[in-house]
Amino acid sequence: MAKLNVTVPAVDVEVNGVKYRKVDRDAQVGDIIRYMDDSDYVTKGAFYAVTRIDGADDPQIVDNDGDEHDLCGEEFEVYAKVSETTGEYREVKRWAEPGERIRIVNKDSVEDRYENGAEFVVDSVDGDGDVRVTAKSGYSVLVLLSEYAVLEHATAKEPAPRRLTVGDYVKVTRGNGRVHVGVVYVIAEVDSSDIPYRLEEINGARAGWKVGHEVVRATDEEVADAKRKLAAETTTADPRSQFAKGEKVRLISGGGNYPLNGYDNGEIYEVATPLYNTHHEGAVVEIVGGSIPVGYAKPEQLARLTIEVGSTVRLTIKDGENARYGWGSVRNGDTGKVTSIDGDSARVDFPAQSYWHALLTELTLVTDGEKTQPQPGSVRFKVGEYVRTLTDVCKDLPKGSLVKITRDDRDSGPFRAVLLDGSNFDFYHQDELERVDAETAKWAKIGRKVGEIRRRDIVEVTSGYGEIKRGDIGEITDADGSEYPGVTVRGIQRYVAVKLITPVEQRFDRMELEATKAAA
């Protein structure tokens, strides 16, 4: 028997805990129908599931004998899932999950099995965000990520970001090699290959590469628990815990011999992985910077570089934070010489200000190889240069504004500095402005931050994926602020790394379109 046992309210029915509601439309796969005709094989008033839609657009069910029954010309009522037919919906451009409803919004030009506006329930999702759905024909059809949007209730909460990126904490659903189920990892690298995620343990140890569908975002509680366990482990007698990733160290023994071939005693190198546990030499510290890519040193073979009186240091304060004792005339990134140390703070002679007070944590030791040659004195700004404002005291422009110098009056406040959009200006002294690097200036000329990509920009693909290859020229169709915007080439959209070719503001075709609109 193929009849369904249901609970029947006025217009709603319930099948295995799932609610359906009577709707006034053609039946679709996934609906149920209430048979209202007379037949020897189908019970009048009973409910049946629609299994497929045939080539004549007639729904098919399985009758009481287990055979397929064509409903062509027969009377029946259509019931659809309540979750799919009630409430207001919005289109959300993201990866779909199995069971969610999608709408075709950008049909591929070669696709003829559905049209824009068609809606489906997702059967499965692959590692690229492309989905499988059941078409009206009853056959499974592949829908590309670029073709659909997910339908969400207007009252639903915004979904968490789907795209994983470098720095995200994750767990894996299938282990292999050095990657284990249940362990929290951090994404160290993302590329456009079929196995895009390189994982590291949270202590910096290398783990391995994983495919997208085997990686899931770790919860805040899981990450916090993993960090607590690491902190407990590193407070033991492991001497490697004194080193930090990125720290500069001096090699004091073992240089030139395996596993330190290409690394010389007395030279300075960088710590890549403090707690490297998978080397057959045992517990070692992985270092980089030699004539071969990596070396492995025991902790007693390394000496930490410490800040002392006479050390050359660089001011390194995190973006958005202020110097503990004020900036004075010093700027982040300046280098100077330590003249005294008192507890957790020091006095430093910088070129712009002597006896500057700093916390030791605000300073980074500069090795001999990193020391720069003395710089020439300040060069007067020129009209047409792009600079950044250093103060907002008695000024109309905010501190940190990117501006263009349009006039030099050579008086007490000679430089007329104009915002990039031309909306405001003010006058500044030489020491109230700083030059920006060439890359910043290049982007400032088009009114953007470095690397800012906007919708409808013309770009070159620098890291291809699937049908889109490196070197392809395309148009940005989804500028979400990430390093992998959505670019469409030959009607196909993929999220890949790109290089700006022509900003949308400089496209002749867009200029003509805007001019036509303005004249209308």
Image (cartoon, grey):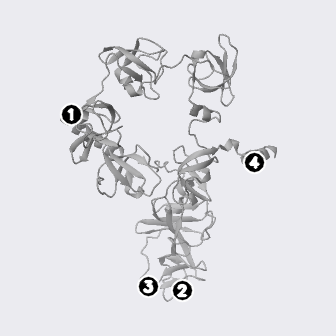
Q: Mark 4 points at which residue?
A: 513
Tell which residue pokes out farthest to the left in this image: 237
For disc 1, the neighbor class at 10 Å (few under 14, some 14 to 19, many from 20) is few
Which of the two marks, 2 or 1, is nearer to us in this view? 1
Where 438 sits versus 189, above or below? above
Q: How far apart are marks 2 and 1 (CA)?
A: 90 Å
517 on left or right of 447: right
Q: Mark number for residue 300?
A: 1
| Comes first in the chain, label 4 or label 1 | 1
| Comes first in the chain, label 2 or label 4 | 2
Residue drawn 42% across the image and 44% down it:
166
493 on left or right of 216: right
State the image coordinates of residue 474 (x, y, percent, origin top left). 62, 52
Q: Mark number for residue 38?
A: 2
Q: Name the residue under label 3.
A: 66
Tag 3: residue type?
Answer: Gly
| Comes first in the chain, label 2 or label 1 | 2
Secondary structure at badge 1 equals helix
Tag 2: residue type?
Answer: Asp
Secondary structure at badge 4 equals helix
